[in-house]
Amino acid sequence: MNDRTALVARRGENYGGRSREERATDRRDRILSSALHLFGTRAYDDVTVADVCAGARVSKRYFYEHFVDRPDLVRALHRQQNEWLLTGIAGAAPESPGSLDEMLRPSVHRLLEMLRANPERAQVIYINAPRMETRRRGVLREDAQFLAALLRRMGGRPTDPLRHERLLLALVAGLSEVIIDWLSRDMSEDPGLLADHLTDYCLAILNTLTTP
């Protein structure tokens, strides 16, 4: 529960067998669910706060109890969906991989499988939310840190942390651009083949981290 939702939850008592906190959380969840469908199927500029409220069956008053405005909603939605994606990817990577290939290949395959099976989530993560430049840069850094955590499963520490950080940031930025291109063509390309190509790309960059 975010701070705005918690504040709303403290203002009332039980109603219809549910506490104010439960009702506030339910409204926020419905708003996010409506936003996922709308931003996952339409262009960013084609979705209004009124559209989201209609889909969630809440009034604008309730919307503004949880979110400042439309960009604030999309940031929250993107954070939620990106966490879902990273959790799935982390689950695909072995805890004690024997090589970079053994760690990366299943992770990249899982990434594309999840996106193809959930096109609305894919649209939110890679197309609509990244329109907000500050959020996009922040997400790339978060994803680079996530990749760094996966690499720590291999053991060892980078000898040049700054070089390591910059190469990981360049890697995830390149991955994102290729995935956006794939999504823009309705994910028509075989995801298995694309996953192999992206894994090869990751290996080509990551193998340079062992080079001074």
Image (cartoon, helix red, strand yellow):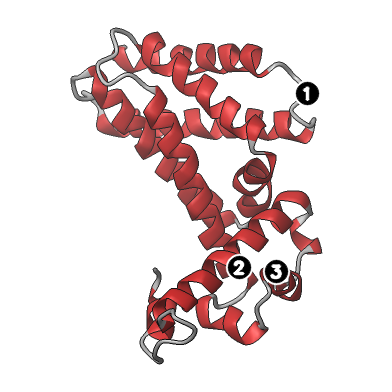
Which residue is most to the left?
156
Please name the residue that numbered disc 3 is placed on: 52
Q: Residues under labels 1 and 3: Cα distance? A: 29 Å
Residue extending furthest toward the front: 17
Q: Residue at x 42, y 44 (%)?
A: 141
Q: In this orientation, which residue lies closer to the viewer: 138 or 57? A: 57
Q: Which of disc 3 and disc 2 is earlier in sequence?
A: 2
The quarter of the picture where the N terminus appears is bottom left
Along the line of sight, the residue nearer the viewer: 180 or 6: 6
**Within-10-Å neighbours for mark 2: few <14, some 14–19, many 20+:** many
Marks 2/3 in contact by CB < 8 Å: the verdict is: yes
| Percent of width and height locating residue 54 | 74, 73
| On screen, residue 176 above or below 28 | above
Q: Secondary structure at mark 3?
A: helix
Q: Report how far apart the C-alphas of labels 2 and 1 lie in the structure.
A: 31 Å
Q: Which residue is mark 2?
A: 31
Left or right of residue 98: residue 37: right
Residue occupied by mark 1: 188
Task: Report whether 123 appears left or right of 137.
Answer: right
Q: Name the amino acid, label 2.
A: Ile
- Which circle, 2 or 1, is nearer the viewer? 2
Q: Residues within 10 Å of mark 1 (few under 14, many from 20)?
A: few
Quadrant in the picture for residue 160: top left
Q: How many marks?
A: 3
Residue at (77, 35) in percent of width and height: 184
Q: Amino acid at mark 1?
A: Ser
